Amino acid sequence: MGERPLLVLGSKNYSSWSLRPWLFWRKVGLDFQERVIHFDAADYRDQIAAVSPSHRVPCLIDGDLTIWDSLAICEYAIELSGRGLPRPRAARALARAVAAEMHSGFQALRAQCPMNVRATGRRVAPTPELLADVARVDAIWTECRTRYGADGGWLFGEFSLADAMFAPVVFRFNTYGGALSPVSRTYLDFVLADPEIGHWRTAAAAEGHPLADTDRIGA
Ligand SMILES: N[C@@H](CCC(=O)N[C@@H](CS)C(=O)NCC(=O)O)C(=O)O
C-alpha cells in the first residue's frame, strides 16, 4: 500500500483556504497526513516553494501527483470517494455553483473579515461591499437550507462540497458577527457544533504563531 496523501496546510487559525479541503477530506472519510506551514516561519517562502507550484496553500501531494488548489483538492476527493455532492442532478449542480461562487467571489468579506478562528466579539465598520457579501451569503444559506436541506442540517441536507467551501465563512460570522436570517443562524450553529469543526477549532486555539495585523482587525 502506498503512502497516505499529504495535505499541506497553512495556519489553522488564519488559513481559510486550508480549512476547506481539510474538512472535506475528513467528512468524506478519506485518510491523509497533514503538515502545517506557519505563515510567520522565517523560511515560509522556501518551505512553500518546495511543495506548491503556485506558492500557496493548501496543496495535496498523492504519490507523484500534486494538486495546488482547494476546490481541485475537494473535487479529487469526490472522485476518490464517490461522496461529497448531493445525488439529484439539480441539487448537485447548485452545490457546485455555490461552491464555485465562494471560490471566486466575496472579495470584501475576505479582505475585511479575514478568518481568525480563535477570535470572538470583533466588529468591523460595515462598508456597502461587505454588507452586500453578507447578504449574499445569507441568501445562499437560506435558499439551500429551505429548498434542499430536508435530509439533514447541512446546506443540501447531507454534508457536501458547498458546506466545506463556506466553513471559513461560518468562522468569520462567529468572529465578526453579521445579520443572518433565522434559517441561516440555525445553519451556523449546526456547523459550529460539528465534531470535525471542533477538532479544527481546538487545533487553532493551541497553535500559537499569532499574526499581529490580522489580530488587530475588529478588536
Ligand atoms: N485559489 C487558491 C487560493 C489559495 C490561497 O490564496 N492561499 C493563501 C493562504 S489561505 C496563501 O497561500 N497565501 C500565501 C501567499 O499568497 O503568499 C485555492 O483555492 O487554494
Image (cartoon, rainbow, N blue to C red):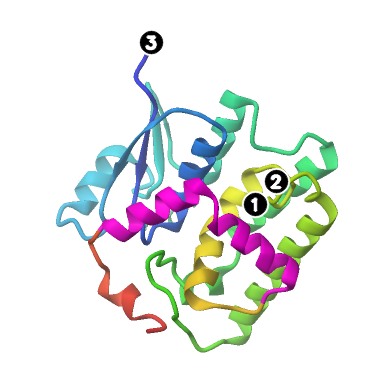
CB at mark 1 closer than 8 A to ligand 1? no
From this viewpoint, is residue 103 visible?
no
Could you tell me which quadrant the C terminus lies in? bottom left
Highlighted range, magenta: 180-207
| Label 3 or label 2, whichever comes before in sequence order | 3
Question: Is 146 included in the stretch rendered in magenta?
Answer: no
- Residue ID for mark 1: 100
64 or 114: nearer the viewer: 114
Looking at the rendered structure, the kind of residue marked 2 is Arg
* Image-quarter location of ligand 1: bottom left
Residue 1 vs 45, above or below: the answer is: above
Foreground residue, 65 or 138? 138
What is the three-letter code of the residue carrying label 3?
A: Met
Q: Amino acid at mark 1?
A: Ala
Q: Residues within 10 Å of mark 3 (few under 14, many from 20)?
A: few
The residue drawn where x is 73% and y is 73% is 181
Q: Please name the residue that numbered disc 3 is placed on.
A: 1
Query: Residue 196 in magenta?
Result: yes
Q: Quickly name the residue at label 2.
A: 96
Structural distance between the alpha carbons of marks 3 and 2: 32 Å
Q: Nearer the viewer, mark 3 or mark 2?
A: 3
Residue at the spot x=59%, y=67% of the render? 106
**Mark 3 C-beta closer than 8 Å to ligand 1:** no
- Residue at 70%, 54% in the rendered image: 98
Q: Nearer the viewer, residue 115 or 130?
A: 115
The local crowd at label 1, few if under 14, some if 14 to 19, many if 20 or more residues have their Cα within 10 Å, is: some
